[in-house]
Image (spheres, helix red, strand yellow):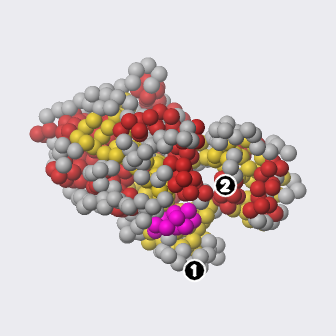
Amino acid sequence: MTREPPSGGPLLAAPTVWGLLVARAGASPEAPLLIDGVDGRTLTAGQTLQAATGLAAWLNAQGVCAGSVVTWQMPTGIAAFVLQLALARLPVVQNPVISLYGPAETQLVLRRHRPSVFIVPRDGEGGLQARASTLLERLDAPPLLLSLPDELPAADPSRLPAEPGNGQAVRWIHVTSGSTAEPKGVRHADEALLRAGLRLAEAMQAGPQDVGTIAFPIAHVGGAMYTVMMLASGASAVLLPRYQAAEAVAAFARHGVTVTGGSTAHYQALLAEQRRQPGQRLLPVLRLLTGGGAPKPPALVAQVRDELGCVLAHAYGMTEAPLVASGCAAHTEEQLAFSDGALVAGMQVRVVAPDGRVCPTGEDGEIRVRGPGVFRGYTDPALDRVAFDDEGWFRTGDLGHLRDDGHLAVTGRLKDVIIRKGENISASEVEDVLSRHPKVAAAAAIGLPDAERGERLCAVVELRPQAEGLELAEVIAWFEAAGVMRQKIPEQLEVLAALPRLGGMNKVSKTELRRRFAGGS
């Protein structure tokens, strides 16, 4: 498939996120910016600026003042989008928490960051508001609890403090969503989020003609990055409070979505919906899938091209460095399939071997990053001593290599290696082979304790909608036909209706899979 990429158009820039909103509202005040994917309500750029200004004034009147730390937990929607911008207008530090977090995780965040204000939606009995009230009773110094209705409150903005002008100050604390450790607070200045969003807009070749989506939790760092992308490019976005694939496809088709994504799980969910109706292209104007946060099997690029009729341009980033590398539609299919994109401007990458030497092109090692797009350290300073090396490079914990063409290929995690009879096996490599099987929709490879082998290799898969079962013998034959070494052939197969997932980007929970299947034979 060949497709002429859109020109994208000129991008706006500003020293702060708030300044970028002001610039966008000035450049195209009547252009749509926010689209509610449930009820279709739309806010233009000018209306968004007005709503954010009024909400900032109301928050200020409630006691949200200079130096406040404001934790907020809202589902993705217009209210949450406007809230993050209203807080960007005030001299405060905002701490977004994804709405998927349960009471235990939310309580840990509140205890660690000790906010002066906690904002949740006014959602009635059994919702986040009721849960927040219960959580605050357990804290020694509970913050002020504010609840926001769908119709956002506003106040006279004439008494607002001066607009922030310094993009270097730490104004955001995003939260990682690890599967085994407590959530960590990641400190960001506007500068890093602006850089990431602008580079994303360039990679997407986004412009006012584009309708995108924020289908993942907006409190994720990707929500702030996507916000900047929209403001810089003039694109609009459909906002969904939850991601159910059938509902999402219907909303995307209704509003003419041209770019979407989120993570590998989102790509796979769209493919599964398309496969249920193979004779009809569900999203006829969709031109691009983009996202990151999880490994992407190379086979997905061709599957997306052939079945969804668009380009899959995966990216690489994390809460600590939102955008390190990104694919774009102009890249070759080989680059799109076997790399995670070209390094974005301003980001430095070094690949380091276990013995500490810098790896040459093509050799795998730990990916380390440095530059103005990297976070300013964790809220717990003790974590920084391990997170950064002596030269200030952030240790990502990811394995990969730089290619001769300047692209970055991410090949796994330092901790995601299966050791079978002394052989190190990359789970990602096994998953890539599994994902090419015609019956497999999604796959995970895990190591399980084994007295003889140390670890045995277990494949856990979701099947495509029309698949009628899968046997281990079929998997073994598939790997043998692929010509991989015998040690990389799974010895155990588990088939699930759905892989367990966690966090805002729906990463597969391998901790849960190991717990569930560790007793197998």
Amino acid under disc 2: Arg
Q: Nearer the viewer, mark 2 or mark 1?
A: 2
Q: Residues within 10 Å of mark 1 (few under 14, many from 20)?
A: some
The x, y position of residue 143, in whole percent, is 37, 34
Q: Residues within 10 Å of mark 2 (few under 14, many from 20)?
A: some
The answer to whether one can see residue 116 in this image is no
Residue 201 image-quadrant placement: bottom left
SS at circle 2:
loop
> In front: 36, or 165?
36
Judged left or right of residue 130, residue 85 is left
CA gap between label 2 and label 1 equals: 30 Å
The answer to whether residue 306 is above or below residue 50 is below
Amino acid under disc 1: Pro
Residue 467 image-quadrant placement: top right
Mark 2 — residue?
436
Tag count: 2
Mark 1 — residue?
360
